[in-house]
Amino acid sequence: MATSPTLLDRWGQPIRREIMTQELSAATVGGARTPMAGYPGDGLNPIRLAQILRSADHGDPVRYLELAETVEERDHHYVGILGTRRRTVSQIEVTVEAASDAPRDVEIADRIRDWIGRDELNDEMFDILDCIGKGYSFTEIIWDTSGGQWQPARLEWRDPRWFRFDPRDLTTPLRLDENGQPVPLEPGKFIHARIRSKSGLPLRSGIARLAMWGWMFKAFAVRDWSIFVQTYGQPLRVGKWTAGASEKDKDTLFRAVANIAGDCAAIIPDSMSIEFVDTGSVSASGDLYRTRADWIDQQMSKAVLGQTATTDAIAGGHAVGREHRQVQEDIERADARAIAAILNRDLIQPWVQLEFGPQIRYPRLRIERSKKEDIAGLSSALGALVPLGLRVEQSVIRDRLGIPEPAEGAEILTPAAPAAPPEDQDRSIKRFSGEFKRGSGADGPDMALHSQGLSAALTEARPPEDQIGARLAENAQPEIERMLGTIEAMMAAAGSLEEFRELLLAAFPLMDGQSLAGHIAEGMIAAELAGRLASEGDDG
């Protein structure tokens, strides 16, 4: 009995089918993979933050990851811009490109297309993109074989605190088993995503490292701002008592002055008064804290989105805003290509191997915004270049035009039959041609018979030479347009006049001019016959 081939992951480890349908990294309350997290952000200061980051650099990332989670929970600006970057990519349309036009490759691609149509895919991609902030993420693939076929049932985000990196290189990922011991990742079970903000170790490549410093300093500014507002944000209350006031009256007045800030209401005797003294410099002093907090937010926007125009409303004009938007689109394309490469490596290739066996080439996911294709330009270029020998796969053109492969038995569009020429025009041309052929002899046309045929043709609504000329022009027009299209395509592809000249010289022998030459010959014959007819009429 034939055995299944041994499948290997990108690290060369064999895939074990018997454990592929199990959940290997689910949370266990009270175990090594507890869902409960600590809060290292409470009372954070520069010394503690430096210690947390240094511990992560040496392979202990728990407090770093917990602090990254805390920053996302407590910083409104950071969670907003980070969520924008993740949601922007997770909502881009995902397409599948078949390995080739072979029926087997098309079948594999169609199978993947059916799966990516799931509504849950957007949320799963959002979770995978957790790697943007922390530097890396782990997603467990839950495989389903209930239908006799291998297929991902769902993609489960796993807390990165439950994973480590090999201490020998701090790059090879490991997972914690039930006893809290690091073990290699099971091949074909995990999507290990990395999107770097800078080159280096995974534990040092996340944007969260920058966000932690920014959040800490902004927390200091906001705390001081709150104290300032509490102290100076309201006018100074001064209570006065009259001479002879008792200690009890003074206590009553003090309680009234103290409580009026929160309640804005107090009860005092008629003999007492309260004054509100406004300090004119409070507003200018308070702006210092806002300026500091806003500046930190702007730096955070630059770190996450590469610009500030779409988040901080400081575009500085339409042109600057457009440039900032282009920067964000550049980052978006880079994220989309990175996540597509990760899914192709850790999900699509193992899936195809499990279901269809090893392949020479594999289908590819593409995550990119659809561009408005110049259908007219593409059609003209193909019409000009394909007759010259350019070989183009139908699947490539279908993908660019967004036209799916037609289903079996579907109604297919076909070219319309050419319209028949008007009856009177066609009859005149045939009569003219027939008379000319019958009057032709060894010594040339029999002008008597030919003249008789032309005289009858002149009784038509239009002169026969005009009818023949129009018909010849109509027949030659497609050939001329084809040649002009080829030349225009060469001009568009050439980068200089010299290159255009070389393209013309190379393509000239391949051009088929026989049809156009035939139309030109017919036109010359028609012109000669029309001249003879006119000369004969003048003589008569």
Image (spheres, rainbow, N blue to C red):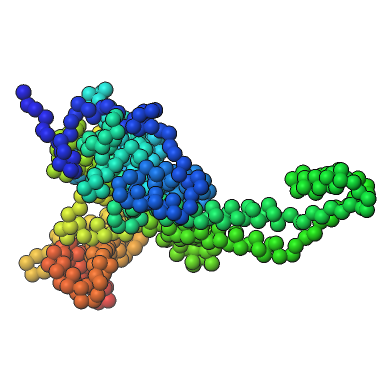
Q: Is residue 371 left or right of residue 76?
A: left
Q: Residue at 83% of width from left, 45% of height from top?
A: 251
Q: Residue at 28% of width from left, 59% of height from top?
A: 380
Q: Residue at 75% of width from left, 62% of height from top?
A: 279
* Image quarter of the N terminus: top left
Total tally of numbered discs in the picture: 0
Residue 350, placed above or below residue 67: above
* Image quarter of the C terminus: bottom left
| Location of residue 141 by image quarter | top left
- The residue lying toward the viewer, choosing from 226 and 155, is 226
The reply to whether residue 485 is in sight is: yes
Residue 539, placed above or below residue 103: below
x, y percent for residue 394: 23, 48
- The residue lying toward the viewer, choosing from 270 and 418, is 270
The reply to whether residue 351 is in sight is: no
- The residue lying toward the viewer, choosing from 247 and 47, is 247
Q: Is residue 84 left or right of residue 471?
A: right
x, y percent for residue 529: 21, 69
x, y percent for residue 324: 46, 62
- The residue lying toward the viewer, choosing from 472 and 160, is 160
Residue 151, placed above or below residue 455: above
Q: Residue at 71% of width from left, 65% of height from top?
A: 281
